[in-house]
Image (cartoon, coloured by chain):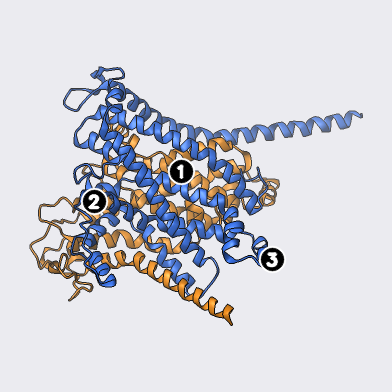
Chain colours: A blue, B orange
Amino acid sequence: MTPDATVGATKVSAREASRARAIRRFKWSIRIPMILLFGLVLTPVLFLQLYFSFHEWSVYLGSWWEADFVGLDLFREVFTDPRFGWAIVRSLGFATASTIGCFVIGFALAYLMYEPFRGNAIYYGIFILPMLTVPIVVAYTAEMMLYQSGPVNDVVSRVLGIDFRPAWLTHPHLAMPTVTLLEIWNWTPFSFIIMLAGLSAIPREPVEAAQILGASRWRIFWEVQLPLLRPVIFLALMLRFLEAMAEFPKTWALFQGGPGSATETVPVYIFLTTWQYFQISKGAALSYVAMMLMVVIVLLAIHLLRREKRALETMYGDKPGEAA
Amino acid sequence: MTKSRSRRITTIVRYFVLTVWAFIAFFPIYWMISTSFKVDTQWFAWPPYYFPDPPTLSNYLNVWFGAQEYTETQYAISSQTPLISLRNSIVIATTATLLSVVFGAVIAYGVSRYKILSEARMFQLLMLRMIPPIVIVAPLSLYYAMIGLLDTMTGLILIYFITSLPYAVWMTKSFIDEVPREVEQAAEILGASRWRTIFEVVLPLVRSGLVATFLFILILTWSEYLLALILSKTNVSTLPVELSKYQGTTEGKVYGRQAALSVGITVPLMIIGFLIRKHLARGFSFGMVRR
């Protein structure tokens, strides 16, 4: 090796090293503000929540930092509280029912629309509207329409020719179904849009091959399209379920947990405990338990989501890993 | 012969089903709009009035401008607060959204090109969005009270910024992933710094994607209710919170006024949604489904 080449090599490696340093600096210049942002806001919040879960404090009892340490008492109270148990059951039921409702309708609409036809754009434009109405607006508009002699009952009565007059807003057994129907109305567009995108992204070849082999539309749907759609279906169901678990504005604005305790979902019950009964500590313990429950659900969902995301990437023909 | 007939039946069934759902989807929106033009005797009538007869603007004038002289009824709750809430909503939603899109795009670039976050970290970021806000809102309001951010615009902007960041990162990343790396390499060879490459080369290339992300997140921040309700008391109220005030009035149900306010809150979103209708799938699926 001539001395000249050695000099050249060190020059190159020096340039490489400085480039690597620059990249490292660049990476940290993005990471640090991110860490600061989350660290300064979320960490104290989580700490406070933990503090209140172990200290009995209510607004009438002086400063919060002088509250009594009560150990696990609050959690014992939460776990033996039948109202909370029912709230969890209600939330799960509501989320499941509305997720299925949104999905079935959304998928049916998407299936009818993924091949171009006349008027396609108009229907699409109308179908996405419910999603663009603010949840609180949905609640108040529902109230304007669902009183017993209101337009909804009137239209259904006229169309079906029967006397249809359920008390959507006042009957305890109808309250939760009403919220569920509103949620379905509000968020069907979400499932519709995702399923439409999924259906349009299916590669044409397998479907065409099945057609040439003489498969019926029904069999093509069940045996070709549905398996290819699995990741997208999973995504649509999961995201919807998680959002429905968190639903608060509609339930609260329409019912505030009533009639009786018919619409006390987990978010509503936490809200009532904290801001209506002013049991801050119990509210914090409730929140903590609810958060842990959600973390478990979300972790499970994310685990499955990552698996399905890989399947999606293969479907869209991305190189796995590149887009990860 | 039979084939063309079955096709015709399919077409008829398709249009029938789609039209029925279009009616269901549109009717409540129609009802909101038509109620906003009705006089008070028709808000809550039996049989219901399907068309405002005669249409009146008094609901709008009363709600948005507090013009008492335009009211034909005794119901008059409003001062001009909806206009102030409108201003608050615009300032809060656009600032928070802008911050999260710009920062989100920078993070997304880092993830896309330099893997500053592993895939696991990216999903942890998503978790932030998936945990319901109700579980942290109480300690958050106390923390805000301690550091003086309760009932301020900054406080709301900050929390909206944080909660919409996951969406911003995921959605912009799906656009940035599509930019060929050759462009940046060319810029680098020409001596541009990494930051200049991001802001002057990469981001302009995904302009339409950024606009879509911006509008998408704007929809979410504009309609947020729970955080706005708890973190604002009197100084700062956003439109959804303002609307909910009409519920507890002692004057009884003032549906026409509510509807006039609702139309004002909803119409901007519908326009935005229409503008980004092609990108909605990408947004709602965190960029996982493309169209």
Q: Position of residue B122 (x, y in %)?
A: 53, 39
Residues behind callouts 1 and 3 on a single chain: no
**Element at label 1:** helix
Query: In the figure, B265 relative to B111: above or below?
Result: below
Q: Position of residue A68 (x, y in %)?
A: 24, 17
Q: Residue at x 56, y 47 (%)?
A: B173
Given the current orientation, which residue lies at the most extreme right position? Answer: A1
Residue A185 placement: quadrant:
bottom left
Q: A101 or B288: nearer the eye?
A: A101
Residues behind callouts 2 and 3 on a single chain: yes
* Amino acid type of the residue that numbered disc 1 sits on in the rendered structure: Leu
Residue B291 placement: quadrant:
bottom right
Q: Residue under circle 1? A: B165
Q: Residue under circle 3? A: A213
* Amino acid type of the residue that numbered disc 2 sits on in the rendered structure: Leu
Instruction: Say left or right for B254 vs B291.
Output: left
Mark 2–mark 1 Cα distance, whole angstroms, equals: 30 Å
Instruction: Say left or right for B91 vs A24.
Output: left
Q: Is residue B218 in view from this perspective?
A: yes
* Amino acid type of the residue that numbered disc 3 sits on in the rendered structure: Leu
